[in-house]
Image (spheres, grey):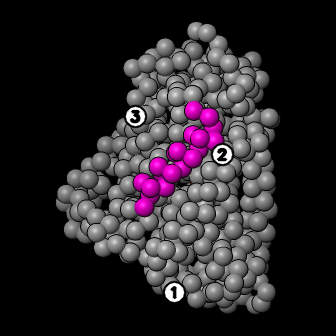
Amino acid sequence: MATQPTTNRGTWNSKLGFILAAAGSAVGLGNIWKFPFEVADGGGGAFVVIYLVCCFVLCFPVLVTEIAIGRKTQKNAVGAFTALGHKNWRFIGWLGILSGVLILSFYNVVAGWAFGYFIELLQGHFDIGGRFGEFISDWSTITLYSIIFMILTAFIISSGVSSGIERASKILMPSLLFMILGLAAYSLTLDNAMKGIEFYLVPDFSKVTLETVYNALGQAFFSLSLGMGALITYGSYLSKKDNIITSAALITLTDVGIAIIAGLLMFPLVAYLNNGDFSNIEGGPGLIFTVLPGVFESLSSPYGIIVGAGFFLLLSFAALTSTVSLLEVPVSYIIDEFHVKRKKAVIIMSTIIYLIGIPSLLSNGSSAFFTEFVTYIGSVSPVSFMDLVEHLSSDTFLPLGGMMIVVFAAYVWKKENLSQELANGNPNFIGSLNEKFIHFGIQYLSPTILGIIFLLTVANRFFGYNPFE
Ligand code: PHE
């Protein structure tokens, strides 16, 4: 295989830059918007333990494999399969690109909500929580915010790998860490904070069912940005000197750490508002948009505006480093495969993806047609266009893609070749316990579990069969 010139593809300037960019991809709306409530619904500390096992045991081998495929080939998610000599398997990359395009199309809309909330709270509009439904169904406002968000994403990507993505991550990630720690520290000082923590973390094993495990794995997979080639793409800019295993461990730790801290920030706030009484709290991700603004309002001035605007700025930063990675996947594909210039590739892809997202934008009340878009077999209530896209891409395609990536690496590319790539920057890898663990993961454990997840999701979402009832 001829070595390809890599100079014009871009590379990370440092190992830290790569870790921050990949952790930025991982840390996103999933961590701050969804994770805390999955924990509360799924049995508190019991869920956290299951989640940790999912991340470090089931997802870790997939994470490592994606990065290794990228670094070995220095190619985008599709080109990587061709470069390894298995052109017939490049459909995995296409599925990944499709998933990325679909996820970004609706993720950008939600990111637009977060950014819009930041602007509203900056102006002290605490009543926004009560107007959430109105806000997201106001298409012109959401169009404005979501366009701004897509432009920010496109701008970062168009500046290239090291001067765009890496530089932005080096600013956004430390700021995010600083903000989340500051906000969590503050919220832990509020009255009833411990009641919130209790609700969040005290294990309740009666809530743990097979469905909890299923949710934990889905959440872990999405949160680590796996199954769609984001890490193949980011890995393709990584130097051969870097140790993939330790990088992947740091990425996972950051992702899990930020998710757990997000709950430490959120639940004391909710407890403060409700005097520690959680019996009337409706869980679910809508809560952060409906309930939190009321909490901010009740804080003494000027904390309300600082904490409120700070919280949604934090959410926007987390979303931005994720949208960047979602857009980079199709962009790097058309740069490599069609020899399009980066700037042009960014303009083409961000426009297409924005357009694909319009029905999602309209599906939260502005258009009845898109809001009640389809009714699945065996279900009674219709789901919106946005939910349909989410069910297809993040819930269905990601586990399928992840399963195929590890099956490919274990049986087609061969695990010995994977090991050789992982040994770059990690000379003791071959023969180590780590190697055995990764091999066992990609050959048996991860594909089996991901395959089951994929089948259950299809049966459950689209055919009305609930295996958990
Ligand atoms: N991991 C991101 C989150 O938690 C979402 C994401 C998924 C980003 C897939 C890139 C690829 O919000």
Q: Quadrant of residue 183?
A: bottom right
Point out residue 250 in the picture as x, y percentages from the top left corner: 71, 42
Q: Please say whether residue 314 is visible from this viewpoint.
A: yes
Looking at the rendered structure, the secondary structure element under dot 2 is helix
Q: Which mark is residue 229?
A: none
Question: Label 1, label 3: how many angstroms apart (C-alpha)?
Answer: 44 Å
Along the polypeptide, which appears first: circle 1 or circle 3? 1
Residue 332 or residue 200, whichever sits in front: 332
Point out residue 152 in the picture as x, y percentages from the top left corner: 65, 57
**Image side of residue 454 versus residue 320, left or right:** left
**Image side of residue 406 versus residue 261, left or right:** left
Q: Residue at x 49, y 14 (%)?
A: 85
Point out residue 53 in the picture as x, y percentages from the top left corner: 56, 45
Question: Label 1, label 2: how many angstroms apart (C-alpha)?
Answer: 36 Å
Whether the residue carrying mark 2 lies under 8 Å from ligand 1 is answered with no
Determine whether 255 is above or below 275 in the image: above
Q: Within 10 Å of the Cα at label 2, are there few (<14), some (14-19), or many (20+) other Cα atoms?
A: many
Whether the residue carrying mark 1 lies under 8 Å from ligand 1 is answered with no
Q: Which residue is mark 3?
A: 448
The residue segment tinted magenta is 340-358
Along the polypeptide, which appears first: circle 1 or circle 2? 1
Q: Which residue is mark 2?
A: 157
Residue 240 or residue 369, whichever sits in front: 369
Question: Label 2, label 3: how many angstroms apart (C-alpha)?
Answer: 35 Å
Is residue 31 located in the magenta-colored stretch of the structure?
A: no
Determine whether 323 is above or below 362 in the image: above
Amino acid residing under circle 3: Thr
> Which quarter of the rendered picture does the N terminus lie within?
top right
Determine whether 372 is above or below 161 in the image: below
Q: Which mark is residue 130?
A: 1
Amino acid residing under circle 1: Gly
